[in-house]
Image (tube, grey):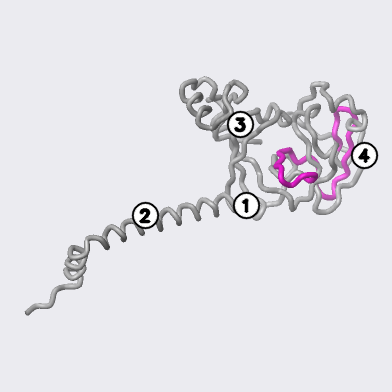
């Protein structure tokens, strides 16, 4: 008698034990789910992470309700640059994440004279910065600072909304090791102050039925 081929034996075995097929399918789905979860965790930990902007300290560059993506591995390939907008652990409470712009780099001599920032004696050109005579404008010590030399491994951070930003003028230098990554794109934006609900489900339903609360023009905006 001719010996069945291997694939024929496999088919016969599967037909004889249908319960095993079901277990195999479930196992495949479970393994695929585990791989997907692990991949998502790896991406979130080492590659890209999403954040939401809850305050106006980076206006007008970033709006309250912007959802951004942060590149977590970029500084493995290039140094931190002046003007980078980065997310970092707040030095006074590392359970909180802050987002500011890099103004001073290690070795820079930084001065603040009123509304002017001088780096190594040269006024810094800042088309992104706005001043609105807010609470920080009343603190003269914040408008008169330095000259000071930024130590190795440290950064001087400021919000674009200068009179409404708690930044290095208040809490000092940022240890570069506290950086989580560089913001690079707004992937979603919503006028969150218009949503009358706090629960996630009801908020989602509200957005679906009120699409005008989405800032459609900001979707895909590069952060710089």
Please determine whether, in this image, residue 220 is positioned above or below residue 178.
Answer: above
Q: Return the disc, 1 or 4, that comes first in the chain's sequence.
A: 1
Picture residue at 21% right of the left edge, 64% below the top: 17
**Residue, far front:** 19
Q: Are marks 1 and 4 in contact (CB under 8 Å)?
A: no
Going from N to C along the chain, the mark reached first, 4 or 2, is: 2
Q: Earlier in the sequence, mark 3 or mark 1?
A: 3
User: Mark 1 to mark 2: distance in Å?
Assistant: 31 Å
Mark 3 to mark 4 CA distance (whole Å) = 34 Å
Measure the alpha-carbon separation of dots 3 and 2.
35 Å
| Tag 3 secondary structure | strand
Q: Which residue is mark 3?
A: 66
Binning the other alpha carbons within 10 Å of mark 1 as few (below 14), some (14 to 19) or many (20 upward) gives some
Relative side of 125 to 221, left or right = right
Residue 215, compared with residue 6, is above or below; it is: above
Is label 3 or label 1 in front? Answer: 3
Residue 113: percent from left, percent from top: 90, 31
Q: Which residue is tagged 2? A: 29
Quarter in which the C terminus is drawn: top right
Q: Is residue 184 left or right of residue 80?
A: left
Give the residue pinned by disc 4.
146
The residue that disc 1 covers is: 73
Whether residue 99 is in magenta: the answer is yes
Residue at point 42%, 53% (across, down): 33
- Image quadrant for the N terminus? bottom left
Q: Magenta stretch?
A: 91-118
Q: Earlier in the sequence, mark 3 or mark 2?
A: 2
Ranked by sequence position, the earlier of labels 1 and 2 is 2
């Amino acid at each position: 008698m001719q010996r069945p081929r291997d694939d024929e034996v496999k088919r016969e075995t599967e037909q004889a034990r249908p319960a095993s097929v079901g277990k195999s399918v479930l196992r495949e789905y479970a393994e695929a789910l585990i791989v997907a979860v692990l991949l998502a965790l790896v991406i979130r930990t080492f590659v890209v992470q999403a954040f939401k902007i809850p305050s106006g300290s980076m206006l007008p560059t970033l709006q309250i309700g912007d959802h951004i993506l942060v590149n977590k591995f970029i500084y493995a390939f290039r140094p931190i640059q002046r003007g980078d907008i980065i997310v970092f652990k707040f030095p006074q409470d590392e359970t909180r994440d802050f987002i500011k712009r890099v103004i001073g780099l290690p070795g820079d001599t930084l001065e603040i004279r009123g509304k002017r920032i001088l780096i190594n004696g040269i006024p810094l050109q800042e088309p992104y910065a706005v001043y609105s005579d807010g609470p920080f404008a009343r603190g003269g010590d914040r408008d008169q600072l330095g000259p000071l030399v930024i130590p190795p491994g440290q950064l001087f951070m400021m919000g674009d909304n200068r009179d409404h930003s708690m930044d290095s003028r208040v809490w000092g230098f940022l240890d570069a090791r506290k950086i989580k990554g560089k913001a690079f794109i707004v992937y979603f934006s919503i006028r969150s102050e218009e949503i009358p609900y706090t629960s996630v489900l009801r908020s989602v339903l509200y957005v679906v039925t009120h699409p005008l609360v989405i800032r459609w023009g900001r979707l895909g905006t590069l952060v710089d």
